[in-house]
Amino acid sequence: MNVNRARKEQLVKQLADVFEKYPNFYLIDFMKLPVSQSVELRKRMRENSHHFVVVKNRLALKAMREEFPEEIRTFFRGPTAIASTEGDAVGLARLIKEFSSQFRVLQVKAAMVEGDVYSGDKFEEIASLSSREDLIAKFGFLMAYPLMKLLRTMQSPLTSLGSVLSQLKTKK
């Protein structure tokens, strides 16, 4: 086995680990990305617990498991980088959108979020979604709101009675 083949097999294994560990990812065309901005992007990704790797399309396709949808495979053309995350896919989308609008260098080809494949034109919609934590907070509020209203309704007669008694006391 030659060194080049061993290196390629190692890269395929590393990419397979990335696909296994990070189920949410974006395929990015980074054609116009200078090295200085690439370093800045990688730094921002690490700070937010995201992962960014430039891939060879052929090796990435070998690394993908069979259960990945066929439609995601069609986007592995031209220069491709994978921005991936274990957690908040919307947070990663916002980071990519912010970086891209700041430097105008990245273009999202496709995304795989929560097992669904989205083409690049849906990226803006994903980036504009509320984060998972925000949605959980809203859900919690909506669950608690009827109980708070019921509590206020039940306290209202007691508050009114206290007000009436206080007024009677001041009159006498």
Image: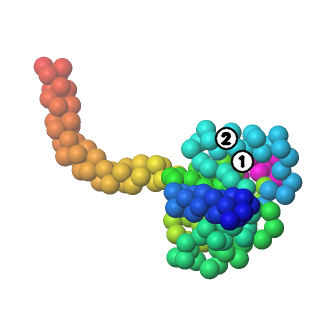
Q: Which quarter of the image is occupied by the N terminus?
A: bottom right
Q: Secondary structure at mark 2?
A: helix
- Judge depth for marks 1 and 2 and give the one in front: 2
Position of residue 73 relative to residue 160, above or below, is below
Quadrant of residue 130 within the rendered picture: bottom right
Where disc 1 sits, the SS reads helix
Q: Which residues are magenta?
A: 97-105
Q: Report the residue at 64% width, 78% height from top.
A: 71
Residue that numbered label 2 is attached to = 44
Foreground of the two, 58 or 35: 58
Q: Give the percent coordinates (x, y) of residue 87.
A: 50, 52
Q: As drawn, is 137 to the left or to the right of 65?
A: left
Cα distance between the residues tagged 1 and 2: 11 Å
Residue at 52% from the left image edge and 76% from the top image edge: 67
**Looking at the rendering, which quadrant does residue 112 occupy?**
bottom right
Q: Residue at x 59, y 70 (%)?
A: 64
User: Residue 102, percent across and down?
Assistant: 79, 45
Of mark 1 and mark 2, the one earlier in the sequence is 2
**Of helix, strand and loop, which mostly describes the magenta segment?**
helix
Residue 21 showing in the rendered view: yes
User: What number of labels is visible?
Assistant: 2
Q: Position of residue 16 (x, y in %)?
A: 57, 63
- Kindly identify which numbered label has been placed on residue 88: none
Q: Amino acid at mark 2?
A: Arg
Q: Is residue 49 magenta?
A: no
Residue 103 is one of the magenta-drawn residues: yes
Residue 164 in view here = no
Residue picked out by circle 1: 98
Amino acid of disc 1: Glu
Q: Residue reaching furthest front?
A: 1
Specify the quadrant of the image occupied by residue 66.
bottom right
